[in-house]
Amino acid sequence: MRDLRAIWLHACARAVWIALRPEILSDPRKNRIAAGSAFVFGNLADADFAVAHFTANPVWGHHYFSHSIFFAAAFTLICWLLLRGAAHRNSILMGLTIGCAYGAHLLLDFFTADGSPPFGIPLLWPLSDHHFLFSPSIFYATHRGSLQALFSMHNAAAMLIELAFLSPVVLLLFFWRRKRGRG
């Protein structure tokens, strides 16, 4: 796991998954699948780290192609088509849920301080190479590299700030879905 932020991102994606499909909590097997899926799809945008390692082309670098709205939409569409092809009974909902988990990553990166150029994420790539970053940033950039940096007070503070901002949103979504399910 790259850093502690990946754990928090997994928790956010899983909370969204459960808010959209609360019935999975009653089935341990589906709950484990949702947890694993939320972890994978919530962190998949950072798979570009691996691509960046093998190429010098900036388009394939970190915070590039996989951090665009168009890539997220294409990924969501591909997931839906694969689920539909596999005759999944809720392929549209599941495809959108996967897309939301992926999109949550872009949203967090948009609001997070970026310590290295190009600053921000290319939300409109391939239409534009412009990188977007909310200013002033709401979330701290996380420190990476050594275990000491990974488990630093700075990273703990970064996670607490994300938790303080995002928990109310996730809880509202969960209770809205729960209320809607009863009606």
Image: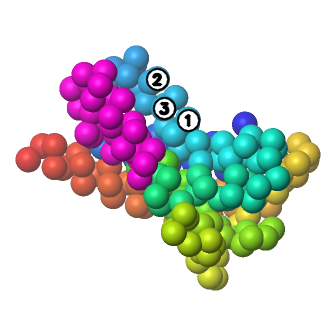
Residue type at the position of mark 2:
Arg
| Mark 3 lies on residue | 37
Marked residue nearer the N-terminal end (1 or 2) = 2
Q: Is residue 150 left or right of residue 133?
A: right
Please, what secondary structure does the residue beneath circle 3 have? helix
Please, what secondary structure does the residue beneath circle 1 have? helix
Residue type at the position of mark 1:
Val
Q: Between marks 3 and 2, how big is the CA–CA gap?
A: 8 Å
| Mark 1 lies on residue | 40
User: Residue 32 shows which numbered tag?
Assistant: 2
Residue at 58 percent of width and 42 percent of height: 44
State the quadrant of the N terminus: top right
Colour approach in the figure = rainbow
Kindly indicate whether the residue at mark 2 contacts the one at mark 1 (C-beta within 8 angstroms): no
Would you place residue 162 above or below residue 175 in this image? Answer: below
Asked whether the viewer can see residue 67, the reply is: yes
Stretch in magenta: 73-99
Kindly indicate whether the residue at mark 1 contacts the one at mark 3 (C-beta within 8 angstroms): yes
Principal SS element in the magenta part?
Answer: helix
In the picture as drawn, the residue positioned furthest to the top comes out as 29
Marked residue nearer the N-terminal end (3 or 2) = 2
| Label 3, residues with CA under 10 Å away: few <14, some 14-19, many ≥20 | some
Asked whether the viewer can see residue 133, the reply is: no
